[in-house]
Image (tube, helix red, strand yellow):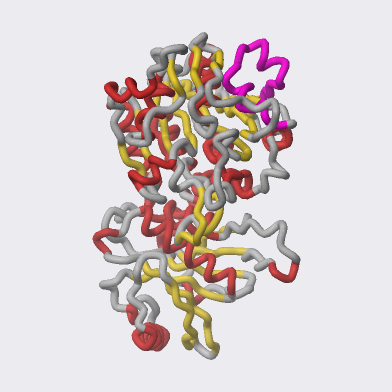
Amino acid sequence: MTKVQVSPQGVLDLRTDLDLLFLHQEQPARKVLPGKAGRQLADALARRGFEAEVGKTVAVEVDAGSARRLVIVAGLGKKEKTDARALHAAAAAGMRAARKCKLGTAGVALPAAAGGMRDLESRSRALLEGLLIGSYSFDRYLSRGDQAPPLRRIVVAAGQHAAAVKKSLAPAMALAEGVMLARDLVNEPAGVLDPVSYAARIRRHFRSRGVQVRVFGRSQLEKMKMGALLQVAAGSEVPARVAHLVWRPARPKKRVALVGKGVTFDAGGYNLKTTGHIETMKCDMAGSAAVIGAVHAAARLKLPVEVHGVVGLVENLVSGKAYKPGDILHTRSGKTIEINNTDAEGRLVLADILDYAQTTIKPDVMIDLATLTGACVVALGERCSAVFGSDEVLRKDLLAAAQRAGELMWPLPLIEDYFEQLRSPIADCRNTGSRWGGSITAALFLEQFVGQTPWLHLDIAGPAFSEKEDAFWGEGGTGAGVPTLLAFLAGIGA
């Protein structure tokens, strides 16, 4: 990870290769830098028609004493609308622009207070998070000449606020590490990260990090009666795995179970996905990646919350052993499921591990994350996750955490009447209903396996993977869900 320092100097006083500045739409550009440099900056931005839209950047040169200095300006949009999301996007976009310059160090000016970011702590933390996450790249499979070298060092010019900004550095770094870990996992090709290698990577990563890891193999899963999960995995030559991670502080205030769908490749089974949909299905384990990233960050910060992460790792492929439409699956809970779509496999995996989590861990709160339904993307688009849950207070707490974290999430209802679509004449339920309200019926399906545990379901199908560059997330796996989970865990541990 790029090294970050905080300095009491002004940005032009730093000995760095370039400078990153931030500009609101109403802010006079000449006041961002002092004297002649500010006037030159304003003239250059005017000539280029730069309007300081959120996440837009421009590079110019200005005079700084006897030398010319490269300056990147990142837009923050309208001042009154500046929030964590805007600052995340501006800082991350600025860092990607800086990387393209292929220089070693960058000085960063602390943005002016505005809108919902008047509080120095929240503003500096959002800035640092954006800078760190924006420095990410997944280029391990590129030839060396095609790789953009990472910045060696970022120096935040915080002036008189340097001491306060430094306090935000540790939580920002913990979050960035969790997000980057999740992004690395999602971005790995499915041929590299199958269920067995994924489980092994989890073990290696958490060795000596204070997190306990147990991995269950096929024979253990059979004894645990995880029939639904095992049937989804049956079409692959690579056996299923379930990993159970535990961060346990000395005196925990709450016990939280995070449950993640980890389908390392989803071909759809016999309801085979078509061209245009199958190409990015390595990302169907993004829910599990978010869980792993959140556990990492919670342990890194030593949060006073006992955090359990349970992830079900399978491939959903086609073979002579694969489960078929019309099959009846027996779940760990004892409920039976009639299969009417083998491409609705994630909920089958979650059914068994949700039951395991609620009966074995007995958490105070249980949250599952999954790239579960295309219907959710139709409803909320590619940037917003859906939040389901019958506990209104818990749902509001999670949505408040999402707002603090700068993630878009929106509540959708659990309409009990829709469960009629899942009725089966030969089993306790079907695994899918009609195409209408598909994200709701999926959540209603999961609700059958959570018992009396306070529970939330996050459908992250939209934001988990970005096929084109996003101002904050970039391109590819995003780590969506990690910021909100960490903010939620920090909130209940406060």
The vertical placement of 187 against 258, above or below, is below
Give the quadrant of residue 138: bottom right
Residue plotted at (51% across, 49% down)? 465
Instruction: Give residue 73's position: percent from left, percent from top.
Output: 43, 74
Instruction: Give residue 95's position: percent from left, percent from top.
Output: 52, 65
Instruction: Give residue 55's position: percent from left, percent from top.
Output: 41, 65
Give the quadrant of residue 182: top right
User: Is 258 covered by the magenta stretch?
Assistant: no
User: Can residue 374 be seen here?
Assistant: yes
Give 385 or 190, whichever is nearer the viewer. Answer: 190
Give the quadrant of residue 79: bottom left
Give 42 or 371, whichever is nearer the viewer. Answer: 371
Left or right of 98? Residue 418 is left
The vertical placement of 305 against 37, above or below, is above
Segment tinted magenta in the rendering: 213-236
Q: How many marks?
A: 0
In what quadrant of the picture does the C terminus appear? top left
User: Is 218 covered by the magenta stretch?
Assistant: yes
Residue plotted at (33% across, 44% down)? 379
Instruction: Give residue 179's position: percent from left, percent from top.
Output: 54, 46
In what quadrant of the picture does the N terminus appear? bottom right
Give 163 or 317, whichever is nearer the viewer. Answer: 317
The vertical placement of 472 against 326, above or below, is below
Residue plotted at (37% across, 28% down)? 441
Residue plotted at (30% across, 35% down)? 412
User: Can residue 304 be seen here?
Assistant: no
- The single residue placed furthest to the bottom in the displayed view is 66
Give 33 or 43, whichever is nearer the viewer. Answer: 43
